[in-house]
Amino acid sequence: MRVVIFWLARTEVATFVRHSAWAGAVLEIVHFLGLSMLLGLVLLVFAAIDVAAFHLVMRRPVLALEAGGVAPLPARIIGGISLVIWISVLIAGRMEAFFKPLLQ
């Protein structure tokens, strides 16, 4: 592993990044955007799993409720998880939109 690290440190790209005033900052911005997009995708997958869980497990009991009835505890837990996931998706999306102009 140490050999690979020393080899990478001697490449032209590494030398360029070390001696450039802006290359390191640009790489950090691209890295951050990639991570935020990955986070958003992961959160959307969790949201899809949450929706599927609700429809497969709790749809019938919730539809059988009378007006003003209290939802079963598992339905409320799934709903709370859904709220947390979607708020996280919104935050991740806003962070990406906030940092995107830095690349233009």
Image (spheres, rainbow, N blue to C red):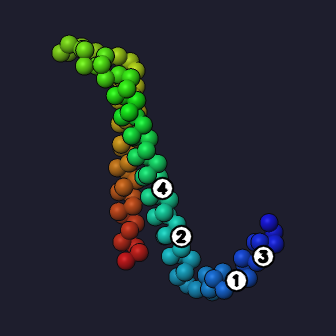
Query: Residue at left 72%, top 76%?
Result: 8
Q: CA distance from mark 3 to mark 4?
A: 29 Å
Camera-nearest label, 3 or 2: 3
Considering only order in the chain, which callout, 4 or 3, is on the residue closer to the N terminus? 3
Query: Residue at left 81%, top 72%?
Result: 3
Q: CA distance from mark 4 to mark 1?
A: 28 Å
Q: Can the viewer see residue 80?
A: no
Considering only order in the chain, which callout, 2 or 4, is on the residue closer to the N terminus? 2
Q: Compared to 72, does 86 lie above or below? A: below
Q: CA distance from mark 3 to mark 1?
A: 9 Å
Considering only order in the chain, which callout, 1 or 4, is on the residue closer to the N terminus? 1
Q: CA distance from mark 4 to mark 2?
A: 15 Å
Are dots 1 and 2 in contact, CB under 8 Å?
A: no
SS category of the residue bearing label 1: loop
Name the kind of residue labelled 2 in the image. Glu
Are dots 3 and 1 in contact, CB under 8 Å?
A: no
Residue at which label 2 appears:
28
SS category of the residue bearing label 3: helix
Image disc number at residue 11: 1
Q: Quadrant of the N terminus?
A: bottom right
Q: Compared to 64, does 83 lie above or below? A: below
Name the kind of residue labelled 1 in the image. Thr
Determine whether, in the image, residue 88 is placed left or right of residue 70: right
Q: Quadrant of the C terminus?
A: bottom left
Name the kind of residue labelled 4 in the image. Leu
Are dots 3 and 2 in contact, CB under 8 Å?
A: no
Residue at which label 4 appears:
38
Considering only order in the chain, which callout, 2 or 1, is on the residue closer to the N terminus? 1
Q: Can the viewer see residue 70?
A: yes
**Image mark count:** 4
Residue at which label 3 appears:
6
- Is 53 in front, or is 19? 53
